[in-house]
Amino acid sequence: MSATFDLVGAWRWLEFAEHELLLFAAVFFALGALDELFVDLAWLRLRLAGKARDLPFAALFRRAPDAPLSGPAAVLIPAWGEAEVIGAMLRHCRESWPQTAVRFYAGCYRNDTATLAAMVAGAGGDARVRIVVHAAEGPTTKADCLNRLYAALVADERRSGTRVRSVILQDAEDMVHPAALAAIDAALETADFVQLPVLPVPQPRSRWIAGHYGDEFAEAHGKTMVVREWLGVGIPAAGVGCGFAREALARIAAARGRGAEEAPFAAECLTEDYELGLLIAAGGGTSRFLRLRDAAGDLIATRELFPSDLGVAVRQKTRWLHGIAFQGWDRLGWGVAGKPLRLAELWMRLRDRRGPLTAIVLAVAYLGIALWGVLQVAEWVGWHVPQPLGDELRLLLWLNLASFVWRAVVRFGFTAQAYGWAEGLRALPRIPFANVIAIMAGRRALTAYLRTLAGGRVRWEKTPHLRHASEVAVPLRAIVATP
């Protein structure tokens, strides 16, 4: 009798745990659904008003992609352990951007001779390529490597007596668009910072891991960034395909107390690009997010091969969460110059920093669903008769289901617009894969952040790259849908 009572009590406790977990997850999912719905509605309003459509490059700027630049431009390319891709990247950049006024600053470390050799080969004797060797043992951080490149740029300016007009950031694995340089150069005539979209390249051998990056960027750079620009809030830099007015970087360096010609990048920050974009807005600068199409109808974007391995994807997103959510909270806070943020800016900061909370809510939800499954099996075999769910929880669950269906429709729409309907359909079963990666990255990001609070060193836990995007023999128009 006692054993039977204990078994009944165990089932009741399990049912109680399931109820509380589902309630916790349902409440936060409902709040997140409202957050996303507001962004969706804002984008729909812009779309109906004709303000969320991709613009034709030629009609907007009335110049050819290979037209002379308005002023000297410097492209900073930090690298560590990139021997497999940096040569192809430099060759592709040189061929895509033939303008004589651009100079490529490719940076490596003294203990990375393989990358140095690949840089020399990729430079091909082009006088526009400047290879900079960091005196420190690598890797330090990406921002530290960028600061070394910036110092080389400043030294060149002093020797030549010519100051560059723009500074553009690219990564060693990037495949640039031929019109991107001209687009950034033209847009910086009226802005301090310009960001072009990032377009992850589909990888048939990694539909589920690498593929989820395409889904997320298609929505983020097709909708969220468009809404951010319309709201007039800070636009985070993606670290690639972004350009800064030279004077804007000088102002940030001066604001850091380093002098206008010193390092503008925060060497202790894991996501210095994200931070830099927001600092432009905080300092009163103008930011633009540009979705443009060339004469063939192709999106002017930076194409990249993102991680196809689960462990590598988790490490990459760990760095993003650590830098944006935790370091962003510490370093940027919730105000500007001692004043609280305006409502729209506060909303976007909350969205940027919700990653760790999202990971917790997802983990709780999956645990609650697992317990629900156990209880359903117990009911089926006659071991337990569950209590009916309360009306409030039942309503929340139905609302969450409706929200999930809507989110799936939105995800399908943006992925299909970027990659075609087949990838749009694959985006739906990729949602659980993205959730699992988010949960794993959230746990690692929290652990890494706590380690730095205890005095641990921030290191560049970079993503290894084995192939350059140009090696994927898929023409642009085969993967990018026209409007």
Image (cartoon, rainbow, N blue to C red):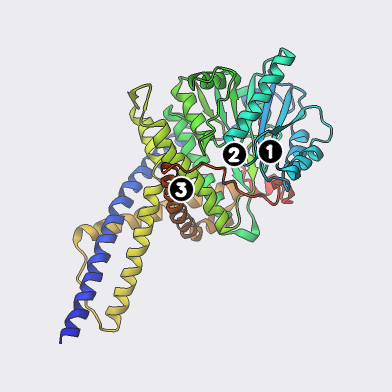
Q: Quadrant of the N terminus?
A: bottom left
Whichever of callouts 2 and 3 sits on the residue coming sooner in the sequence is: 2
Q: Picture coordinates of residue 335 (x, y %)?
A: 36, 27
Left or right: 148, with 408 as reference point:
right
Residue denoted by label 1: 109
Crowding around mark 2 (Cα neighbors within 10 Å: few <14, some 14 to 19, many 20+) is some
Q: Are marks 2 and 1 in contact (CB under 8 Å)?
A: yes
- Spatial separation of the CA atoms under disc 2 and disc 3: 16 Å
Crowding around mark 3 (Cα neighbors within 10 Å: few <14, some 14 to 19, many 20+) is some
Left or right: 446, with 295 as reference point:
left
Instruction: Tell me the kind of residue under disc 1.
Output: Tyr
Instruction: Tell me the kind of residue under disc 3.
Output: Ala
User: Does 318 appear above or below 44?
Assistant: below
Residue at the bottom extreme, as displayed: 1
- Spatial separation of the CA atoms under disc 2 and disc 1: 9 Å
* Residue 435 appears anywhere in the view: yes
- Spatial separation of the CA atoms under disc 1 and disc 3: 25 Å
Q: Picture coordinates of residue 455 (x, y %)?
A: 44, 41
Numbered badge on residue 140: 2
Residue at the top extreme, as displayed: 161
Q: Secondary structure at mark 2?
A: loop
User: Does 464 appear above or below 455?
Assistant: below
Q: Secondary structure at mark 3?
A: helix
Residue denoted by label 3: 448
